[in-house]
Amino acid sequence: MFSKATANFVREIDHEGSLIHVSRINDSHKLVLMALVVKRNCNWFWQKPKYQPTDFTLSHLLQGDKVLVPGVSEEDFVTYKGMYGDALSGKLDTEAGTVNLSVEGRGSTKLQSCFGKLKKEGLDFNKLLLDSQDRQVDMQHKLVKQLQKRAELLAVVKERIFTTSSCTINLKKKKQCSFGGVLGLKSFLGNSVKVCVKDSNNIEVDSNVSLEIPSGTVIAYSVRELEINKDGSFDICLQPGTTGGIESDFPIPSLDVTDGKCNGKKTHSAVHNGSQEIDLSPLAELSQTTRHAIFKELQEILKDRTALSYLQSVLEDMCSGFGETLVQQEELSESQRKPVLAMVNHLCSDGAAEDLCDTPAHFSAAHLLVSAMEELPDETLSFLSESRPDFLETFDALVRLLVLLHILTLFTCA
């Protein structure tokens, strides 16, 4: 809810600009001027880079005891109040041979965010450049060493926009869904064999949530990337869109390498005409018990976008060869972390390789699936998380029998 409100704000105020919306209210206190933010370049073409605030500032990263004191400018920004709503309805009827499936849904959402009078703070880069011109980065700092191995980037907070008084975000939702499915199968071999599967389901959900935001909460910020060399010298990329990096001796395969600096991760597949290809079928090859266990945990994770983002990061780490650090990545509650780790354990129990450089195919497939789910709107995630397992199992059976029906048709026509 907070993430959607801040995303709407940035979309209205700075569409296609340099502002980044704050997705987690717990990150607000970290986003001071000159704070360090980790930029994670994503693997799939539909994803945007992810930004993870750290507990460090640029001063913590530099050698020497002298603390950098940022020059700060402050000004009134805007007074913001936004209301977003939609009403959606849809119905799908499909029939193939003796198989019939119908899905119908209606829903409405109303998001009201009143951030009130906002202020903007900006960093004086002239002062920062003068104060840091003879300073070097401590290349033994744990944050630097971790990022060298992971081929991620560092950026420094240039400006931030924050509230000046307490404000509220209200979200009202109303949803109604119905499903139905019927299957009949007749043998092509002359025998009078009939199979019938029926299922129906109705879901109604109403919710009204109000969130109070304290004064001083950062809702958006912008950054400038750092270019760090192996000898500790560094530059701040002053032009928007200029890419930085950390020069490293670690051999990390990447299709995105500039001037000896690795700016990407190991890719999962060859690139063809600007797109990546990967097969989801390895997930279907897992045992039925494992598939059901994974589905159960995934449904729980879909209820919480923060947990879903964490799962995506975990799978990305494991596919890139950094699985050993996956449990310390995010500030999550135990209830958020538990289904993520349980799902990963189910994937590992079904044939995960010892050498993560040779990632099992079902890990890559799961990473692709979860990455795509992360881009879905909240309403769709909620729909998937609330669907009854027995209906989805029946739907799975319908799909499998449709495939069988198609194969039998091809066989009889041959």
Image (cartoon, helix red, strand yellow):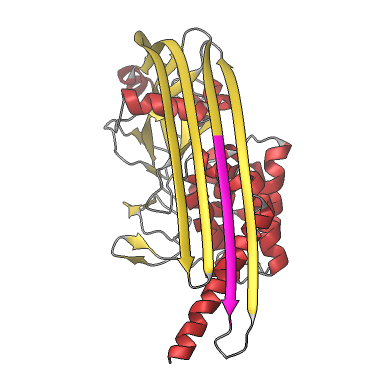
Q: Is residue 236 above or below residue 351?
A: above
Residue 16 spot, x, y in % from top left? 29, 33
Which is nearer the eye, 138 or 381? 381
Residue 211 spot, x, y in % from top left? 58, 19
Chief SS of the magenta region? strand
130 relative to 113 in the view: left or right = left
Q: Looking at the figure, which quarter contains the C terminus?
A: bottom left
Q: How many marks?
A: 0
**Residue 347 picture quarter:** bottom right
Magenta residues, start to end? 175-186
x 58%, y 91%: residue: 190
Residue 110 spot, x, y in % from top left? 48, 25
Q: Is residue 374 above or below residue 214?
A: below
x 60%, y 44%: residue: 302
Q: Is residue 29 above or below residue 327?
A: above
167 relative to 292 in the view: left or right = left
- Residue 184 magenta-drawn? yes
Residue 316 visible, this angle: yes
- Residue 137 magenta-drawn? no
**Residue 397 picture quarter:** bottom right
